[in-house]
Image: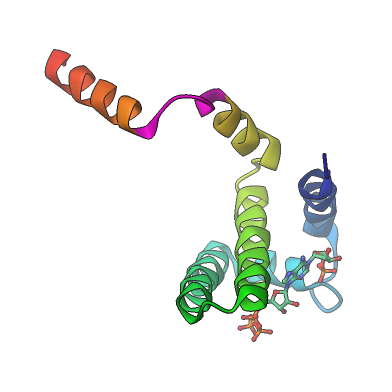
Amino acid sequence: MNDILERLAIILEERKNADPKHSYVANLYQAGQDKILKKLGEEAIETILAAKSMERDAIIHETADLWFHSLVMLADYGLRPEQVLNELDRRFGLSGLEEKANRGKDNDDG
Ligand SMILES: N=c1c2ncn([C@@H]3O[C@H](COP(=O)(O)OP(=O)(O)OP(=O)(O)O)[C@@H](O)[C@H]3O)c2ncn1[C@@H]1O[C@H](COP(=O)(O)O)[C@@H](O)[C@H]1O
């Protein structure tokens, strides 16, 4: 399995001590949480627009930007991609419909 998410996470940690003049990621950290979240929102919108355009290369490019900025957001919060992958792994095989129905039961109980 490709380990690019983990390799990127290591770089993103290192960039916490890098010079913003020489690093896009260090620049984002310096600009702060609101800037990181703004970029994440922009990339989400650009991904949607690419999907609407139905241009496959654009969809891949914009989704990569979205995933990358999600990793920056996670790193900013001290979280690692492995934790998200573990959550997806935990959900694997559990139907979204089933999960939603169980959520309803939990609400009825409480
Ligand atoms: N994967 C990426 C990556 N994907 C996208 N980007 C940058 O994310 C930005 C996307 O912003 P936009 O497309 O909105 O373009 P923009 O107009 O330049 O952005 P703004 O001026 O609006 O902020 C661009 O500057 C891209 O270069 C990335 N920058 C870095 N990485 C990885 O992060 C590592 C560390 O990067 P540095 O910290 O710059 O060394 C690199 O070695 C790469 O592996």
User: Can you tell me which quadrant of the image ligand 1 is in?
Assistant: bottom right
* Residue located farthest toward the top when viewing the structure as drawn: 109
Q: Residue at x 54, y 66 (%)?
A: 40
* Residue located farthest toward the left when viewing the structure as drawn: 108
Give, as a single range, the part of the protein colored magenta.
90-96
| Figure check: 2 above or below 51 | above
Numbered disc total: 0
> Colour scheme used in the picture?
rainbow
Q: Residue at x 60, y 71 (%)?
A: 59
Q: Residue at x 82, y 59 (%)?
A: 15
Which image quarter is the N terminus in? top right
User: Where residue 6 appears, x then y in whole percent?
Assistant: 80, 43
- Is residue 51 or residue 21 the one in the foreground? 51
Q: Relative to residue 103, is residue 83 drawn left or right?
A: right
Q: Relative to residue 44, is residue 79 drawn left or right?
A: right
Q: Residue at x 44, y 24 (%)?
A: 94
| Figure check: 91 above or below 78 | above
User: Where residue 35 appears, x then y in whole percent?
Assistant: 55, 71
Q: Would residue 15 be visible to someone looking at this image?
A: yes
Q: Would residue 80 be visible to someone looking at this image?
A: no
User: Where residue 110 appears, x then y in whole percent?
Assistant: 16, 16
Residue 87 located within the stretch drawn in magenta: no
User: Where residue 51 appears, x then y in whole percent?
Assistant: 50, 72
Residue 92 located within the stretch drawn in magenta: yes
Q: Relative to residue 63, is residue 93 drawn left or right?
A: left
